Structures are given as C-alpha cells and as structure tokens.
Amino acid sequence: EKIIVIGAGILGASTAYHLGKRGARVTLVDRNEKGQATDAAAGIVCPWLSQRRNKIWYRLASSGAGYYPGLIRELEEMGETETGYKRVGALSLHTDERKLDKMIERALKRREGAPEIGDIIKLNPFETQKRFPLLSEEFSSVFVSGAARVDGRALRHALVRAAEKRGVTILNGNASLLTEQNRAVGVKIGEETIKADKIIVTAGVWAKQLFAEAGIDFLVSAQKAQILHLKAKEEESGFWPVVMPPGSQYLLGFPEGKVVAGATHEDEVGLDLSVTAGGVHEVLHKAIEAAPHTADCAIVETRVGFRPFTPGFLPVFGAVPGLVGVFTANGLGASGLTSGPFLGSELAKLVMGEETELDPADYPVEGAIG
Ligand code: FAD
C-alpha cells in the first residue's frame, strides 16, 4: 500500500512521521508556500487558560499539549534535538485581580483532567516582572508551569528529518489530485505522476484550491497574521515564560535574546503576503504597551502566515466524502502548533485503520464541505 501526504506543515510532517513509524510506504510532498502557518507561528503551547468553551476544541488542544513531552523525547532519541520546544511556563497578565482569580478557578478545574498544567501560581507585579524583565510593573499574573513554547519551523524540520529516517520519501513540488470518477488514484507533481492507494491532504489554506480542482468545495478560510522577531539585550531570554497580556497579543522569549511579538488577526484580506505599516504598528504598539522595554529591542525579522480555519472554528479530520481514498485534516486555526503533532498521529492511525483517541465523528470533514 502506497500513501502520499500533500502538505508538510506541522500537520503533514507529523502525519508522515507517524505513518513512517508504522512502516507504511509514504511520500511527503510540499511546494514551500510562502505564508505557511507553521513557519510563521509564535509557538505558545498553553490551551488550558483559554476562555473558549467548546469541549470538542478543548479536547483536541489539551490532548495536543499533553502529547508534546513524549514526542519530543522520541525525536531526541532519534537524534533530533533541535525542536525549539521548552517548558518555560506561561504568564497570563491582568490588572484586574478578580479576572486572575477566575482564571485560577478555571485552571484548577481543568487540571483535574490535565495534570500536565503543573503548578498554578498567582504572582504580584514585582514577581511577574522578575520572570519577564521587559514587562511593565502594572500587571499581576497567573503563572502556569506546564506551558511551553516551541519553534514551529524547527519542529517541522525535525519531524521531516525523523520521517525520512523512518523511510518516508520527501519531495518538493506542486501536487494535484489525479481522480478517476469518484476515486483518487494518485498525485501529479509537475509533469510526474505517482500512483497511490491513499492520499492525505494537509495543505492548510491552500487545500481549497487543491480540492476545487477535484470538484470539491472545501470550506477553509485564511486569516492573515503578521508577527515580529525582536532581539533583546538580555541573554537569558531562552528561559523566559510565554507572556499573554489581556487581549489576543503575546510575547515569547527564545534563546540568545530572541523575542517574538505577535500577531495580527486579519480576516478577508486573502492570501496577501505583504508586511503592512498598520500590522507592524499594531503588534509593536501592543507589545510596547504591555512590555515597555521591548522598545529597546532591535527589529530582526517580520513573518506573515495564514491560519487555516474551517466552519465554526472547529478542526476537521477523516475521510473526504465523495472522493474514495482521500483523507484530510485542517482548520487548526490559531492553536495548530499545539494540536498539530497530536492530530497528525491521530490521522495516521485513522488511515491505517487503527483506533483513534479522538472520535472522528466529533470532527467531521462533512462540516467543511460546501
Ligand atoms: P501550514 O503550516 O500552512 O502548511 C500547509 C502546507 O501545505 C504548506 O507548507 C504548503 O506549502 C503545502 N501545500 C499546500 N498546497 C500544496 C500543494 N498543492 N502541493 C504541495 N504542497 C502544498 N498555534 C499554536 O498552537 N500556538 C501559537 O502560538 C501559534 N501562533 C501562531 C502565529 C502565527 C503568526 C500564525 C500564522 C499561526 C499561529 N499558530 C499557533 C497556528 C498554527 O501555526 C497553525 O494552526 C498550523 O501551523 C497549521 O498547520 P498546517 O500544517 O495545517 O498548515
């Protein structure tokens, strides 16, 4: 049996790795789209403080966070030590003490089902700033020790290399589906045709176009995100916790003074890769407001990525109805670095006919077909 995975973002890379681990004959193909979500992502792994109430989303995101430590160990045992993953904890900031108490309540309740949350500690402004020195002195916080940050680019590379070590063939190119009536029989990559028994589409926002060519209206939409990489003078930034100020912005420390500040949420702008004055202004304004000392940082890099959303902001995975032999997963939205590695493992199980931990009926692909 031959399997082709189209799209090597976090989801496709993880799927191919887990299929390779099972000894399947797998080819992973990617066309290196600029705007790949995984490559631009910030890297927060902390789903537990989210105010989102949807249980199906939460199950996926919290399972995803819980899956990380084991996967990272596995990759390290294969010699893949460059994943950018570290459990540095997270600080959720607020000036309103009642909001923080509510947050603690929520986190304590969620810890019953997710011990990996770790310690939940309330910190005063002094203690908060001590943990992330760029911050202003106005915020108290809740610190959650089990939260982590991960470098999406590094982890994706590590997974692709690990997949290769498991015998997966890696190809560069633009893939399209080869169909005969209602069945997919292979993939066309440039002028070359590769026959396959099963095809897995993990193509992020570009899945829309790929499925359209096969006559399927796949409802994935793109949310543009602009994000900045800064450089602080502080060298111990690799140990700083993830910072989540009130609102949807965030700051992360990585080794050697690297600070990531993000990100915009731009709907209805299409696949526009430009770094805009307004986007940079928004990110910097909010970063400097919460953490005045970021004003002294050098601006090193800007990245743009497209978060893939499926209807109801709910991810989907499973077989594609109406197209025999094709499977897909998509819609990881703003939490795909958290859930992607785990969902890739689930998708690999499903394709191999094994039992999954998630119930695929909770994440129906039908919901993303127009
Ligand atoms: P992508 O990473 O977009 O990958 C899709 C791949 O498919 C691309 O590589 C593309 O080249 C390939 N492809 C498409 N069509 C074809 C074709 N026809 N042939 C060949 N290849 C094809 N999540 C978190 O959990 N925490 C965070 O802190 C976080 N921060 C984020 C910050 C930003 C700025 C952004 C943009 C996202 C963030 N996310 C975060 C979300 C996360 O990055 C995404 O949900 C996740 O990366 C989606 O992965 P994916 O594999 O589905 O898609």
Image (spheres, grey):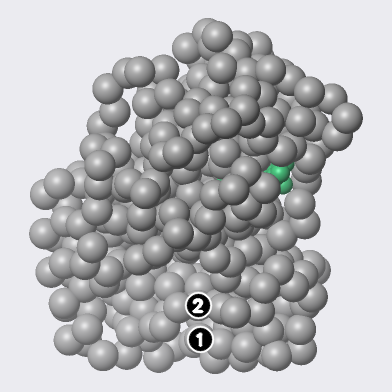
Element marked by disc 2: loop
Report if the CB atoms under discs 1 and 2 are less than 8 Å apart. yes
- The residue at the point 65 percent across, 11 percent down is 167
Depth order, front residue of 144/16: 16
Picture quarter with the N terminus: top right
- The residue at the point 44 percent across, 54 percent down is 369
Left of 364 or right of it: where is 244?
A: right
Seen in the picture, residue 325 relative to 302 is either above or below; the reply is above
**Residue 31 image-quadrant placement:** top right
Residue designated by label 2: 249
Amino acid identity at mark 1: Ala
Left of 168 or right of it: where is 308?
A: left
Element marked by disc 1: helix
Position of residue 175 measured from the top left corner of the image (x, y, whole percent): 74, 37
Seen in the picture, residue 330 relative to 180 is either above or below; the reply is below
Q: Mark 1 or mark 2, which has the lower sequence index?
A: 2
Position of residue 253 measured from the top left corner of the image (x, y, whole percent): 58, 62
Position of residue 46 measured from the top left corner of the image (x, y, whole percent): 37, 57
- The residue at the point 16 percent across, 56 percent down is 110
**Residue 359 image-quadrant placement:** top left
Residue designated by label 1: 290
Left of 298 or right of it: where is 238?
A: left
Depth order, front residue of 199/44: 199
Seen in the picture, residue 51 relative to 199 is either above or below; the reply is below
